[in-house]
């Protein structure tokens, strides 16, 4: 019997509605530990995942998927024998050491894990990060099991031998810096720095980006010459190419105006003949080419107000989804059920979360930039991508659901109770562990438990 269904079957319906269990520390076993003393072959046992095996053996999800020709969901079965490349035999613990890294604008946990030859899960565990793997500029992180030297932090396994160059990319609707970094085989930080994008890493349709460190293979994929295509909705229009007008208010700078409209300082300066970006005046009317629509998403949710950069990204994603064909709510519900069944997650739980988060609305975007039916923020999307072993585009309905269900799967496997797993989806597992459930989290958990009765 499915572990979640067994847990639910042993609890009375009335008790389930009111039960919000006592919190216990979330134990993600083996995370951050040294690689297991492993053979090159592994026989799959109940409850194991490719992500967990990658951590245990000191390798990566992508390498296990490739070595075993797994499907896009990294599906494995009890009793299956897997080849484990880059295991403890090939990489001894003496070749690894803990490293420290100070976060700079554009860094993500996924990029850092790749650069240091470790995993997202290991970095999350070592630093007590929440389920969204949120990091901030200036934060010092411990990178367990790092293979990268201090003098060459970006050297990682086979990536170091791949031919690299500086590519040029013209932004199209649906592009994000994170997706481009993965496509071209480089990092978010490298693209952000090369194009002076700032901490929000906002890009606009039609903008030309310099992509440093692009691998030949990545460039071939991006150009469509490697037999691969990127998953992009079929009818995204020319969103982001409109021209807006802005009247300068007291306290505004060209940088803050650019961030608000989702464009670069250079774009505004060029369009308005501004030679010195620091010299603008109150009441001055500026032309903003390629402005991202505003007002589609507010800036406050559940009493929390989000930064202008996050809200600008949320507005951009909302506008993209509004210009895109998306499945109906009924179709999204069916997709949630099917995906949950395929990934071994209780469909009633997945449906309850999706309904509570968005009402099965694929066009939903929150001020926190939580996207789509499953309301996944981009950093959580990166984590989910690492867990399933492939890139997930949160604007694509199928990928959005896979991301949310993958996160649910990990939370239910690593949490002390169903209630704690549900709370972790809303509040963040590390936050729940540290602070307990906030009042709004308790209401969220109670609502989801009741909704599970409806979808059972």
Image (cartoon, grey):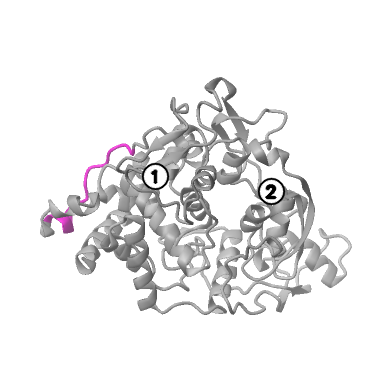
On the rendered structure, is 212 left or right of 176? right
Query: Of tags 2 and 1, which is closer to the observer?
Result: 1
Q: Position of residue 175 (x, y in %)?
A: 64, 64
Asked if marks 2 and 1 touch (Cβ < 8 Å), the reply is no
Q: Nearer the viewer, residue 364 or 71?
A: 71
**Which numbered marker is on residue 49?**
1
Q: Nearer the viewer, residue 36 or 319?
A: 36
On the rendered structure, is 240 left or right of 78? right
The answer to whether residue 341 is above or below residue 82 is below
Q: Position of residue 318 (x, y in %)?
A: 54, 72
Is residue 361 located in the magenta-colored stretch of the structure? no
| Magenta-colored span | 15-26
> Which of the two discs, 2 and 1, labels the residue nearer the N terminus?
1
The answer to whether residue 58 is above or below residue 201 is above
Mark 2 highlights which residue? 186
**Badge 2: residue crowd in 10 Å (few <14, some 14–19, many ≥20):** many
Q: Position of residue 155 (x, y in %)?
A: 68, 35
On the rendered structure, is 243 left or right of 364? right
The answer to whether residue 168 is above or below residue 437 is below
The secondary element bearing badge 1 is classed as: loop
Q: How many marks?
A: 2
Residue at the spot 43% in from the left edge and 60% down from the top edge: 402
Residue at the spot 25% in from the left edge and 50% down from the top edge: 418
Residue at the spot 66% in from the left edge and 60% down from the top edge: 202
The answer to whether residue 359 is seen in the rendering is: no
The answer to whether residue 136 is above or below residue 374 is above
The secondary element bearing badge 2 is classed as: loop
Q: Position of residue 284 (x, y in %)?
A: 78, 72
């Amino acid at each position: 019997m499915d572990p979640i269904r067994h847990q639910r079957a042993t609890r009375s319906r009335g008790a389930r509605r009111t039960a919000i269990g006592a919190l216990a520390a979330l134990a993600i076993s083996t995370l951050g530990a040294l690689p297991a003393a492993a053979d090159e072959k592994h026989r799959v046992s109940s409850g194991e995942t490719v992500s967990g095996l990658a951590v245990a053996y000191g390798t990566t999800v992508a390498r296990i998927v490739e070595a075993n020709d797994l499907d896009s969901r990294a599906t494995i079965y009890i009793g299956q024998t897997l080849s484990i490349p880059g295991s403890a035999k090939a990489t001894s613990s003496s070749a690894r050491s803990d490293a420290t890294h100070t976060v700079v604008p554009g860094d993500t946990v996924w990029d850092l894990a790749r650069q240091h030859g470790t995993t997202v899960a290991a970095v999350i565990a070592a630093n007590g990060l929440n389920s969204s793997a949120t990091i901030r500029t200036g934060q010092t992180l411990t990178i367990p099991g790092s293979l990268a030297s201090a003098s060459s932090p970006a050297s990682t396994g086979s990536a170091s031998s791949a031919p690299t160059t500086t590519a040029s990319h013209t932004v199209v609707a649906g592009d994000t810096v994170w997706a481009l970094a993965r496509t071209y085989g480089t990092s978010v930080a490298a693209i952000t720095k090369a194009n002076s994008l700032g901490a929000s890493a906002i890009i606009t349709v039609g903008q030309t980006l310099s992509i440093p460190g692009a691998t030949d293979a990545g460039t071939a994929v991006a150009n469509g010459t490697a037999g691969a295509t990127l998953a992009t909705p079929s009818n995204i229009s020319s969103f982001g190419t409109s021209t807006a007008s802005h009247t300068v208010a007291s306290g505004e700078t060209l940088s803050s105006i650019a961030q608000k409209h989702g464009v670069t300082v250079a774009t505004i300066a060029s369009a308005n003949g501004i030679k010195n970006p620091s010299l603008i005046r109150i009441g001055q009317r500026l032309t903003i080419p390629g402005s991202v629509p505003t007002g589609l998403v507010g800036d406050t949710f559940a009493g929390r107000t989000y930064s202008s950069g996050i809200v600008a990204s949320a507005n951009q994603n909302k506008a993209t989804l509004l210009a895109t064909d998306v499945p109906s709510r009924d179709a999204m519900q069916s997709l949630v059920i099917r995906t949950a069944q395929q990934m071994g997650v209780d469909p009633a739980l997945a449906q309850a979360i999706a309904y509570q988060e968005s009402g099965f609305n694929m066009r939903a975007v929150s001020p926190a930039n939580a996207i789509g039916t499953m309301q996944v923020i981009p950093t959580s999307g990166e984590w989910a991508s690492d867990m399933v072993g492939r890139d997930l585009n949160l604007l694509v309905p199928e990928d959005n659901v896979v991301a949310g269900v993958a996160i649910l799967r990990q939370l239910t496997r690593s949490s002390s109770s169903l209630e704690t797993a549900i709370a972790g989806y809303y509040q963040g597992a590390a936050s729940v562990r540290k602070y307990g459930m906030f009042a709004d989290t308790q209401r969220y958990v109670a609502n989801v438990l009741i909704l599970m009765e409806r979808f059972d």
